[in-house]
Image: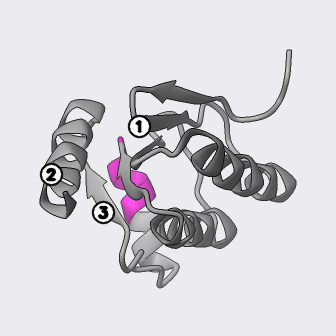
Amino acid sequence: MTDRVPILKIGEILLVSIQFDLEDQKVLDLQDDLSNRIVETGAKGVIIDISSLEIVDSFVGRMLTVNASLSRVLGAETIVVGMRPAVAITLVELGLSLNDVRTALNLERGLKLLRRLNAGRA
């Protein structure tokens, strides 16, 4: 079993489902893997599901911002879904506002938002 974060392709969308708390190197691996997959697939959108994360530190918080910016530069909008209240509180307490990172409560809402954003860009 690999310890890399799975990135699934669903049509023109990449779904990143983070199923375990991330150490710094895994965060960097995910950033590389995701940017490569966006280029390989021509994805128009990325959804990062963090509903399984119980702990978020400043490094992981910055990773969310960097991934959203990197994805946008490569032509894909990013939505972070499934943020738990405790995670949101921690991010605010750490002073991470996640500027330019769009969020949705769950995967279904994230997909709707992503479709609406991509329809507006077309």
Q: Position of residue 4 (x, y in %)?
A: 78, 34
Name the foreground residue: 68 vs 57. Answer: 68
| Amino acid bearing label 3 | Arg
Q: Position of residue 76 (x, y in %)?
A: 43, 57
Mark 1 vs mark 2: give the one in front: 2
Q: Is residue 2 magenta?
A: no
- Residues in magenta, as a range: 82-88
Give the residue pinned by disc 2: 119
Q: Going from the N terminus, do you reach mark 1 or mark 2 first?
A: 1
| Callout 3 crowding tier (Cα within 10 Å): few <14, some 14–19, many ≥20 | some
Numbered mark located on residue 2 in the image: none
Which secondary structure, mark 1? strand
Seen in the picture, residue 80 relative to 50 is either above or below; the reply is below
Residue 119 horizontal side relative to residue 72, left or right:
left
Give the residue pinned by disc 1: 13
Q: Is residue 86 magenta?
A: yes
Q: Position of residue 28 (x, y in %)?
A: 79, 59
Instruction: Calculate the distance from the C-alpha at mark 3 to the C-alpha at mark 2.
Output: 16 Å
At x 55% / y 26%, what residue is drawn?
A: 8
Give the residue pinned by disc 3: 102
Seen in the picture, residue 76 relative to 40 is either above or below; the reply is below
Q: Going from the N terminus, do you reach mark 1 or mark 3 first?
A: 1
Residue 84 horizontal side relative to residue 14, left or right:
left
Residue 60 horizontal side relative to residue 81, left or right:
right
| Callout 2 crowding tier (Cα within 10 Å): few <14, some 14–19, many ≥20 | few
Seen in the picture, residue 74 relative to 82 is either above or below; the reply is below
| Amino acid bearing label 1 | Ile
At x 45% / y 77%, what residue is drawn?
A: 93
Q: Going from the N terminus, do you reach mark 3 or mark 2 first?
A: 3
